[in-house]
Image (tube, helix red, strand yellow):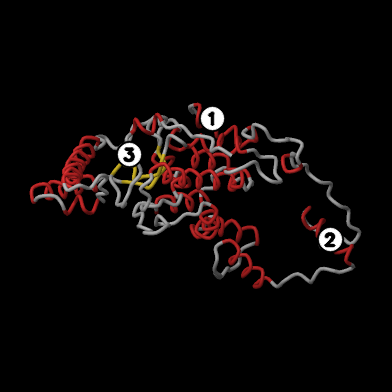
Amino acid sequence: MQMNVRALAILISLLGGMLLSADHSHWAFQPISRPEVPQIEKSDWIRTPVDAFIGRRHEELGISPNREAEPKTLDRRLTLDLIGFPIAFEGTSYEKKIEQLLASPHYGERWGRHWLDVARWAESNGHQHNRDRPHAWHYRDYVIESFNRDLPFDQFIREQIAGDEMAPYSDRHLIATGFLAAARYSGNELDKEIQRNDILVDITNTTAQAFLGLTMACAQCHDHEFDPISIEDYYALQAFFGKGQPGDVILEAESPPFELVAERWELFEGVRNRLVAREQSRGVAEPNVIPKSVVKGMNQKEAAKLKELDAAISGYSRVWAFYAPSDAGTSLAIAPHEMRWPLQRDPEFLEGFEVQLLDR
């Protein structure tokens, strides 16, 4: 698999190489060792190593296990645990029942929801306006499918944190970056640096917590108070995501609509500049012209053209994804999305963006 430097660096970081100044003798960074399985005298009910550890604790407490549950009780527990609701079984072995449930599409629905909680996934932006994300559902389906196809966890990680950079390109890999794109996104922030920083902070904190098992949020302002994580470590991780951002990315097609998108923005910005100039002529030094005002300020011909272009762009399949134009192996078009104050969309801005270490 071909991966560029940023994607490779992320993967290395997830294997423990990211913490530049950490004390690696800290207990939390020690490799997990397999403990010795206890030998239990009364072992007629013990079938697995896990049972042996439970049995040892029983001996310490002087208690005995309950009798084995009846088959119908076990069936109910099994179905509730694996697919979330009870179903009837007839004449199949316990092992076959498990295989049947693991093969059910409901298995991914049942267990994928827990990962969606970890990923803080939602179909809206959060914050003040909480605008809908009509194309965010692709990531939900990706998670469910990943559980159902028993996707290896290392591949699950790669796709979610570097899917836009994996080669060869795959729509599935891009959809997987919905993990990063699930960040809260305020459309009410006029300060673009603060708006962008809030998103990167959300992405950094969630990535560290989900994949490293670390709550690194403290280190965005100062060295961690009790974990060996410095503020330098925090922004070293954040820098991996600095050249990308969430948006409605158009999936790869035979003729990506770059010209359509460019024409749409040219029309939009032309009207916006006209409205800004009008406000300045009235003595307003720094006019704030929101997108809704731009649309309302169009003449009949401009409004009709905008409607035509938006309809054409909407004919392409889109996904709410995280995309870094300068790092991605495939050039993709970004569709306009409804937002009061959207992030800067200029690819040159993203390519030149650098994460800064905030002064302590």
**For residue 359, what is the image quadrant?**
top right
Residue type beneath disc 2: Gly
Question: Circles 1 and 2: CB distance less than 8 Å?
Answer: no
Q: Mark 1 or mark 3, which is nearer the start of the sequence? A: 1
Foreground of the two, 133 or 57: 133
Q: CA distance from mark 1 to mark 2?
A: 44 Å
Residue 327, horizontal then vertical, whole percent? 42, 30
Residue type beneath disc 1: Leu
Q: CA distance from mark 3 to mark 2?
A: 60 Å
Judge left or right: residue 182 versus residue 206.
left
**Mark number displayed over residue 195:** none
Locate the C terminus and report the quarter of the image it occupies. top right
**Mark number displayed over residue 8:** 1
- Spot the residue most to the left: 301
Residue marked by disc 3: 345
Q: Does dot 1 land on a helix, a strand or a loop?
A: helix
Foreground of the two, 67 or 330: 330
Residue marked by disc 2: 55
